[in-house]
Amino acid sequence: MNILIVDDHAIVRQGLRQILAESGKIDLIAEAECGADAMRKLREDEWSVVVLDISLPDRNGIEVLKQIKKERPKTPVLMLSMHEEGLYAVRALKAGASGYITKQSAPSELMTAINQVARGRKYLTPALAEALADCFGEDHERLPHETLSDREYQTLCLIASGKSLTDAAEEMCLSVKTVSVYRSRLLEKMKLKNNAELTHYAIKNGLA
């Protein structure tokens, strides 16, 4: 298999590379540290699986995922994140990801996930399977945060975690003014008045 690792932390890429190399099943391992670099490498070679981080310095990982699926719809993408499944996993799967694991996962789980998605199957942890079942249930009513765009949702999660607009803007690689617009939109959509109500909602719904 040929694997492309997309993560902005060199130490994470090195750890993943070591796990993959020790498996003895990988022919080629390449690395990218941002979305633009990932797309360039994706266009240059064919990849069995792309291991893609949610948080990248130039673009949100789900935006990169959508572009990958647009240009290389048959390439399996395994999302890797420090966030628990409940935060981004369902959104990632809806955007075309073949699986989602956290960075706290055991090395053996990473290889299991890669082998599974490389065969064209989905890799779901028990927690993610339960979240999907809740999301796609016949009588499921969309919660307010499920109506948000990916950027609005990311803004919600960052503010709820205690980040200021400046901190959130830095993490999202956007201007404070742009993040402020996202904040205004999400408050309007969710019928919330301020950051305190936003944080209370996020805690109540397991988003923070």
Image: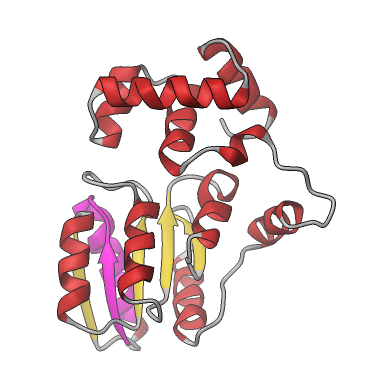
Magenta region: which residues?
A: 1-22
The figure's colour scheme reads secondary structure
Q: Is residue 163 visible?
A: yes
Name the residue located 53 percent from the left edge and 52 percent from the top edge. 91
With respect to residue 74, does 39 lie above or below? above
**Horizontal arrangement in the rendering, residue 50 relative to residue 201 (left or right):** left
**Horizontal arrangement in the rendering, residue 105 relative to residue 73 (left or right):** right
In front here: 24 or 31? Answer: 31
Examine the structure image and report whether residue 95 is included in the region drawn in magenta: no
With respect to residue 161, does 67 lie above or below? below
Q: Position of residue 104 (x, y in %)?
A: 47, 53
Name the residue located 49 percent from the left edge and 36 percent from the top edge. 153
**Horizontal arrangement in the rendering, residue 16 relative to residue 57 (left or right):** right
Q: Is residue 161 visible?
A: no
- Image-quadrant location for residue 52: bottom left
With respect to residue 205, does 20 lie above or below? below
Quarter of the rendering occupied by the C terminus: top right
With respect to residue 120, does 177 lie above or below? above
Q: Position of residue 18 (x, y in %)?
A: 27, 71
Quarter of the rendering occupied by the N terminus: bottom left
Name the residue located 35 percent from the left edge and 88 percent from the top edge. 25
